[in-house]
Image: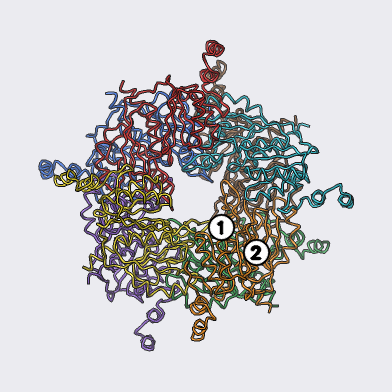
Chain colours: A orange, B brown, C cyan, D blue, E red, F purple, G yellow, H green
Amino acid sequence: MREILDSVAAGDLSPAEAEAALAGYATSGAGRFDAAREDRAGVPEAVLADGKTPTEVADLAATAIETTERAIVTRLDAPTATTVRERLDEIAPDATVRWDDRSNWLVATTSAFERPSLDASVGVVTAGTSDAVPAGEAALIVEEMGATVTRIDDVGVASLARTIDAVDGLRDQDVLIVAAGREGALPTVVAGLVDVPIIGLPVSTGYGHGGEGEAALSGLLQSCTALSVVNIDAGFTAGTQAGLIARQLDDARD
Amino acid sequence: MREILDSVAAGDLSPAEAEAALAGYATSGAGRFDAAREDRAGVPEAVLADGKTPTEVADLAATAIETTERAIVTRLDAPTATTVRERLDEIAPDATVRWDDRSNWLVATTSAFERPSLDASVGVVTAGTSDAVPAGEAALIVEEMGATVTRIDDVGVASLARTIDAVDGLRDQDVLIVAAGREGALPTVVAGLVDVPIIGLPVSTGYGHGGEGEAALSGLLQSCTALSVVNIDAGFTAGTQAGLIARQLDDARD
Amino acid sequence: MREILDSVAAGDLSPAEAEAALAGYATSGAGRFDAAREDRAGVPEAVLADGKTPTEVADLAATAIETTERAIVTRLDAPTATTVRERLDEIAPDATVRWDDRSNWLVATTSAFERPSLDASVGVVTAGTSDAVPAGEAALIVEEMGATVTRIDDVGVASLARTIDAVDGLRDQDVLIVAAGREGALPTVVAGLVDVPIIGLPVSTGYGHGGEGEAALSGLLQSCTALSVVNIDAGFTAGTQAGLIARQLDDARD
Amino acid sequence: MREILDSVAAGDLSPAEAEAALAGYATSGAGRFDAAREDRAGVPEAVLADGKTPTEVADLAATAIETTERAIVTRLDAPTATTVRERLDEIAPDATVRWDDRSNWLVATTSAFERPSLDASVGVVTAGTSDAVPAGEAALIVEEMGATVTRIDDVGVASLARTIDAVDGLRDQDVLIVAAGREGALPTVVAGLVDVPIIGLPVSTGYGHGGEGEAALSGLLQSCTALSVVNIDAGFTAGTQAGLIARQLDDARD
Amino acid sequence: MREILDSVAAGDLSPAEAEAALAGYATSGAGRFDAAREDRAGVPEAVLADGKTPTEVADLAATAIETTERAIVTRLDAPTATTVRERLDEIAPDATVRWDDRSNWLVATTSAFERPSLDASVGVVTAGTSDAVPAGEAALIVEEMGATVTRIDDVGVASLARTIDAVDGLRDQDVLIVAAGREGALPTVVAGLVDVPIIGLPVSTGYGHGGEGEAALSGLLQSCTALSVVNIDAGFTAGTQAGLIARQLDDARD
Amino acid sequence: MREILDSVAAGDLSPAEAEAALAGYATSGAGRFDAAREDRAGVPEAVLADGKTPTEVADLAATAIETTERAIVTRLDAPTATTVRERLDEIAPDATVRWDDRSNWLVATTSAFERPSLDASVGVVTAGTSDAVPAGEAALIVEEMGATVTRIDDVGVASLARTIDAVDGLRDQDVLIVAAGREGALPTVVAGLVDVPIIGLPVSTGYGHGGEGEAALSGLLQSCTALSVVNIDAGFTAGTQAGLIARQLDDARD
Amino acid sequence: MREILDSVAAGDLSPAEAEAALAGYATSGAGRFDAAREDRAGVPEAVLADGKTPTEVADLAATAIETTERAIVTRLDAPTATTVRERLDEIAPDATVRWDDRSNWLVATTSAFERPSLDASVGVVTAGTSDAVPAGEAALIVEEMGATVTRIDDVGVASLARTIDAVDGLRDQDVLIVAAGREGALPTVVAGLVDVPIIGLPVSTGYGHGGEGEAALSGLLQSCTALSVVNIDAGFTAGTQAGLIARQLDDARD
Amino acid sequence: MREILDSVAAGDLSPAEAEAALAGYATSGAGRFDAAREDRAGVPEAVLADGKTPTEVADLAATAIETTERAIVTRLDAPTATTVRERLDEIAPDATVRWDDRSNWLVATTSAFERPSLDASVGVVTAGTSDAVPAGEAALIVEEMGATVTRIDDVGVASLARTIDAVDGLRDQDVLIVAAGREGALPTVVAGLVDVPIIGLPVSTGYGHGGEGEAALSGLLQSCTALSVVNIDAGFTAGTQAGLIARQLDDARD
């Protein structure tokens, strides 16, 4: 501990980095950032922008980059993205920032950041164009956790030939995340055809009864196959679960 | 009208038959039986046993057989079936009575009854064994309306080969009723493969969230194919809708 | 296949048309367009604008017109309609474009397009003015599938004389689509009066408990008549189901 | 007050009667009986058997008959009815007891009881046989409040001729209670045809989505007519509301 | 009929008036207006603006004033109100127009209109300020039907003294409409204190679980008093039901 | 720790007691009993019989009495009560056992048990007879935690005089638990009249929409007073929360 | 009373103050303000801005400050805050106004106002940044009732070390309000660790199934600990309940 | 194929075995058994007894054992278990049959059956005794798929020490299945402490709002950790998902 405090005194370590090293979390104006999450739970901490003000999101992103050399922000809209970018420009002007305005995520990394690399592949599968938002979020976090992502898009069962054409590609993956909105039939059909673990990701498409992803969610929960499921649009959760399995596989393959 | 009343006076017509002929319905102790339904709406009147006492069901069945030479009773349990049979034994001892204790229906016909015969075929399709109850009810009423029924069972999508093996048989039908519980994916997959009208019939299987057929119903309503749907376990409704289409086809084929 | 590829090489066939001919679907920047859907499932493929960006909708509409000489877009708002029209102006400047800003659909056809013509009539019935949106969508797709559409409007049961005045017109149709919001009583009353198949179309009117069409949907599912049902506001689905029945009738009448 | 206490001392008044006269309620072993309810709120107090033990129901019924010369018990099953009858036999052996085992109510009156008589008529209307339970409960309480009850049964809209045949009879009533289960369309149709106040009474029939009366309730709440509504199966509430209107009319007619 | 057509030919009667006189309804560009509703069902026809375009609302309002000398529009927002006023300015420049921008209704009457006058009083009661919107709608229609309205405001049970202070005023009315949001306890408490018929009007206040009026509605349906109920915010329905009772009382008092 | 183990060796301490002393919990065949709960969280551990077999309940009750000299079992039916009593007869034949077959709880204590005694009073209030089950469970646990319980029964607001008569008694308590089913208005009315903390306890009475206590729960959550709430029928939770407040008051009064 | 009226005549007392003193409430243009609430029910009256117009809120705030020297407004947006401030500037120019634009409350006090001071401490605990809104509302009202508030933020269980680090601080409080959104696990974990009464405050975070705080609410209601609960986002209710307990403790400590 | 048919002819292969080998499924009187499921989808086919008659279950179990030397039946009650055992006694008298009457499963294997053996460990974790049913079902199927199961019971978070004591054991597993009913907090807490993939298994305990496992399910879906989830009580699905991950790990470890 003395060493850490010496580094702070010498200016080699920011107070946030020191707090993160000592307590496992860093306190910003907008709350605490769980800098130790990746070590402890195997999953990088991300900032969920929903329910926070742009300033709070920027504060937490800044703390993230200070303590872990990377900031991952999800579900942020354009004005929040602007606020975050401005803050990062100030505190980490040479950071690389990627913003996906379709899947609404932003990732910034400093040059000091080293992304892990796992010997495992995750397939991210969609039924149609409308599944892009959560599928993109899932792919992002799988990549940030270090696994290889393969996108297999537009293979919805209303046109079963497309699904069947894709089977070989699906079998090549170690884990699959299968997104589907509306009636959510795709994950069930895929799970009947391949023997890799599948995480069903319901998507908030559809209107009327069972709309907003509720039919897809309940269909996935009722599936007579071996699916596990995450919440509607919870691409981040699907991705981290797939990432944890990839970590186990990478470990087993060493 | 005079003729009818003369027949009653002469004992050639029962009062119930006379009322049915004059007013379109017959009054029993348990309520009115809509004897004119088949003429007016194309669908034979049936007695739904749910929510009625065994005696009420028997009264209505007796009136049915008196006025139309046939009684169709649905959703009746074993004790009600016994009460109905005893009543029918009294009033129409030579009637033919069929009771299906799996699909819970009973049909009685006198020798005077002539079942219609339609030049049209209806496929009744199930995903698995648990769909038997409403599928049986649907098949019954299609047959009573005069169309040819073909059963195509156990073709659920968890084992997609079974589904695909069945496609040619499915394409041979004029109309399909496709039953499915749990996640209800089968009707969507079938509707993507064949170009005949399909009526989705959700089945009250499944437990937990979306159980009792709710997931199947909302999945069918959300389907991105051209399905129409009936309520959970509403085999009778699916069957009558298919029967009405069969009547139109039979008429067109003349 | 060689022939197709020769045509591409010669510039007589676009790559999208070639892909559609070979694989049954065409890939655009925004996903795959199921060009073979009409052949396989009897229903023209349409682009559902909900949940897609204007650019994605325009991409898919462009692919549709390239591969099938027609683009059908549903549930599109005014800005998306503008984007689509601009794209179609570029790629198919002589196409005929119809946009219905009440029912929110757009149909474009090139001069090469030949709409099918079916010997069958579909009645599209509304209870009141507020049912116009999904009824218009249903009528559109029935027409695009080639059947004759008759609109029978404003016959809600609160003023029963209007309903009864309409009965003869209703009986003249081969199939009926009956739209109704609020308590959704119209389809049940109509189904008690006519012997043609009826597809109930619940409409998202009404506020408070059972609002947004939920009361109408559950009422239609509970109806003691032979109705089948589609989801709330699902005019497209009601129309395609009616269209499939019309195709069977047309076939039977040949 | 002294007078009352003197009567108790003299044995002319039971303690329960005295408590009722002084405090407005009488305390039994099973809770308090609101003996003053009829004076204060115009509605006789009844004992709802649901959620009480047979002994508690009997205690409250005994207190009712002691303090008001009448006991009304609703929603009681056969064993509870037996317990209540035995208790009443003990404490009021000459009371007249009526038990309706279809609508599950029991009414006992001593010879001292004088039922009110109102110059007002209430029609109790049902769509079909299955509506008998709550309709019977409604009719009971209207009669106990003193109005004239007319039953108009089996006029469901699936057979619209029956409904229309009944219109003249419906128009003759001062108030209507219209019961309906399943899709609950009858009250809306009737309210479009007559100009008397109507209380819609949803009935817990129907299975699947919207079953157990939920579709009927939400349909009645969504009705575009002037209906008011009570809860599913709440025949007692419908009856008391009609009875209160009847009281106002009787008063106005004096 | 000849007389009516002669009047049209002579220009003394508009085509809409003639259609209303002959068929009971008048057809505008936006649908049919049920001009005979007041005669048949005792309730003036009103135009519900929800789900219609401003132009459609204006069309229907114009037809209303042409055929019945009065137009009642409910749930209209400010832009729609402007469109309606402009249309009425054109076709009936001397009509009196009242617009309530809190309760969102508009009433226009020509000088030829004679409002009915009933010998009956209706109390419209609120628990608090937030109940103003539907209470105002209810009061409007009661007045348009001709009964006397008394407003009794801000008597919510959280401050029981206010409720009890109001009891004498409540007992003076022939009928009460009691509005209440949140937990909806006021109608139950009032119904325990007075012996006039009460219509409970749940209001869409409240957030979280049971918010938007759902808790109030279910509380009113569960009330152990003699309440009848209308849907959440359905001031118009509560008002017409009260108006129908007032008509019966007025008739009885003659 | 050595001391404890020596006692086990000497037979002065059962293994369960030793485990409880060392680890805070004791392991039985049916799971762990949280013997340290009262020390840590201020609330005695109880055995919830729901979802356990009679044998499992008896195992846990036996462990409870072994480690804490008291066993509290809630929501147990008659056969389970018999199994528990038999087990307790074996292992603690001189224990005092109380079983309440209305509120479905059982408490056993050995002579070594010393119940705490708190200087604080808790009022347990019911609206009517049907609230007895959870009110009895709440009263039980408050007594077992050592506070004084006063029962104030049958003061429902449908008869407001009863409620107001009770106000002085209610104001004398330190804390109130107010049970109410159906529309759940009582806690709101009481909270407007007294200034002590109130815990609302919804009761699973009522049928139809909002039945089974759902209307009462949502009404309590929506109340515009300072109520806190527990789940439907959760008398145990209401009682422990009241008990914790009583402990704080007892501590403050020392 | 004479004294009060003399003061009004002399101009020493406003009419609102006089009405408040005499009747317990004061009438403004926008409704009645319950000036006696704090005396009667122990809780200061506040103005809930939801569902009221800015002018109505300002009217009620003005009446509040006139009659009690303090105005508390909750759930007000920025434009309403501006309207309220302008009104207060007019009628009480020297009042101190605090506005929290994150938790959306405004408190104004005149120099004559004396805030109570209670010898009791309330901890307001949050799981994360998104809980700030209702936690701030709860803290506000606890302070206005006079208890000491300690904020313990960002101790969510996903990073359990943060929770455990906070335990000692939590045990130091007399009462805890624990806010939590999403899955709402924090209050259960805390309740297992400390022996003070805890009020769970669910927060409307989270999307998909169980979003908007519904999962947190149902989780808190299901908790196997001694929690009581308030509605989603009901910081005001949680705060007043804690404040009432604090008042009892303050009283006991005297 | 000829070889197979020869074997049938020779009596070396039953017709069911032959059908399974040729078509991938075997047809019994009660439906088809998906004998190829394990090869294709990695998961052994099991017979779900819910919704089937005892005879149907026995038929399918017999076919299972004929074609795969093993029968797995889930969710079967005692009478069904008896029927199945009797049938197995007939057709495979030397099979080993295990029946778990707490978790309601039955497994039979012939001596020819070789259970797979995977180099991977799965922890099955419960919060309390009531989680035993689905946890037992999960453990069963994991074992049948060949992985090592470790049970870690009774570590619910209400007694956090128990949870923390278990952490090291939890970290030793490759995958965790964490069951929890009521508020379902355990999986979230565990997922914050360990870095292995976790499958949350909600359990149908709990009464009142959110009861029957709905609160647990929505809490798990809302969890801010990397959980995936299966339906309420879906131990079989949780187990097969864990088994598929175990297969991947076993493969990677080779």
Q: Chain of mark 2?
A: A
> Is disc 2 surrounded by few (<14), some (14 to 19) or many (20+) residues within 10 Å?
many
According to the picture, the residue beneath numbered tag 2 turns out to be: A139
Disc on res. A79: 1
User: Quarter-wise, where is residue E227 in the image?
Assistant: top left
Calculate the distance from the C-alpha at mark 2 to the C-alpha at mark 1.
Answer: 23 Å
Q: Label 2 is placed on what type of residue?
A: Ala
Disc on res. C174: none
Q: Is residue A106 left or right of residue F63?
A: right
Q: Is residue B169 in view?
A: no
| Image marks 2 and 1: residues in contact by CB distance under 8 Å | no
Judging from the image, what secondary structure is the residue with disc 2 in?
A: helix
Q: Is residue D237 in view?
A: yes
Q: Chain of mark 1?
A: A
Q: Position of residue F223 (x, y in %)?
A: 35, 51
Foreground label between 2 and 1: 1
Total marks placed: 2
